[in-house]
Amino acid sequence: MRRAFDVLVAGVALALTSPLLALAIVAIRLESKGHPIYRQRRIGVDGTPFDVLKLRTMVAGAESMGAGLAVNVGDSRITRVGAVLRRLSIDELPNLVNVLKGDMAIIGPRPTVPVQVEQYTDRQRGRLAVKPGITGWAQVNGRTSLPWDERIELDLWYIEHRSWRLDLRILLRTAAIVLGGEGLYKGDKGGWQGPRGTDSQSSS
């Protein structure tokens, strides 16, 4: 039933937002060089790798510039169009294609990059027990502004208490958060502490 729900919601949402997605792609192409669709390797259910799809909101090659994976408010690598796409969470719309492909679900922990998963404790690896989602319990309880360990604990709580009622609650809170633009950047306390002491927001 969950797979049927994911396919139905993703299909309808993609159909309804396709004009907006096309407009965003054109705007990205007009403003900066590079492909408008950004691919990044993430880790899915049971540790299976896949490429997550997003609209590019930064200049091409941003990961090799400045702070690398770390992104915070005012980052000069974010384009003007990208700032708008991030504010409205439009950059996440291509995630719907990942849902249709079966890599992701509508609701679940956000997918993380391999280097983050390598740092998981045995308990934290429980986060990989379900498909990663477009939105999830951690996303509606602070999003990227939360410390990384706290985000993982919220995701583990979701997995332990997963239900249709909780999923509906997450969807309703997601709509409110998107409209309010909350938790878009890590701030002073959010983000993941990398192996070389660098914060990363890449799993948002």
Image (cartoon, rainbow, N blue to C red):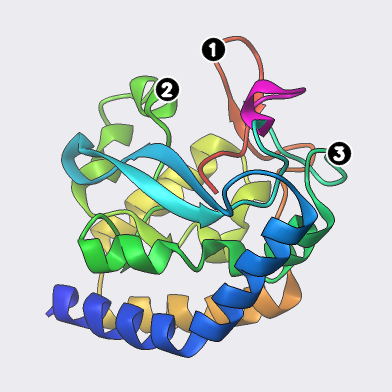
Nearer the observer, 113 or 37:
37
Determine contact: label 1, label 2, CB under 8 Å: yes
Which residue is labeled 2 in the image?
115
In the picture of the structure, the residue carrying the numbered disc 1 is 195
Dot label at residue 94: none
Q: Residue furthest left?
A: 1
Viewer-side label of 2, 3:
3
Mark drawn on residue 76:
3
Examine the image and state in which quarter residue 94 appears.
bottom left
* 155 to the left or right of 174: left
Task: Judge left or right: residue 33 versus residue 137.
Answer: right
Dot 1 or dot 2: first in sequence order is: 2
- In the visual, does 4 lie left or right of 85? left
Considering only order in the chain, which callout, 3 or 2, is on the residue closer to the N terminus? 3
Q: Amino acid at mark 2?
A: Val
- In depth, the one of 192 and 18 nearer the eye is 18
N-terminal of the two: label 1 or label 3? 3
Q: What residue type is disc 3 on?
A: Ser
- Whole-number angstrom distance, CA of label 1 to CA of label 2: 9 Å
Horizontal and vertical percent position of residue 3:
16, 73
Report helix, strand or loop for mark 2: helix
How packed mark 2 is, by other alpha carbons closer than 10 Å (few <14, some 14-19, many 20 or more), is: few
Q: Secondary structure at mark 1?
A: loop
Q: Residues in magenta? A: 62-68
Check whether the beta carbons of the residues at disc 1 and disc 3 lie within 8 A of each other.
no
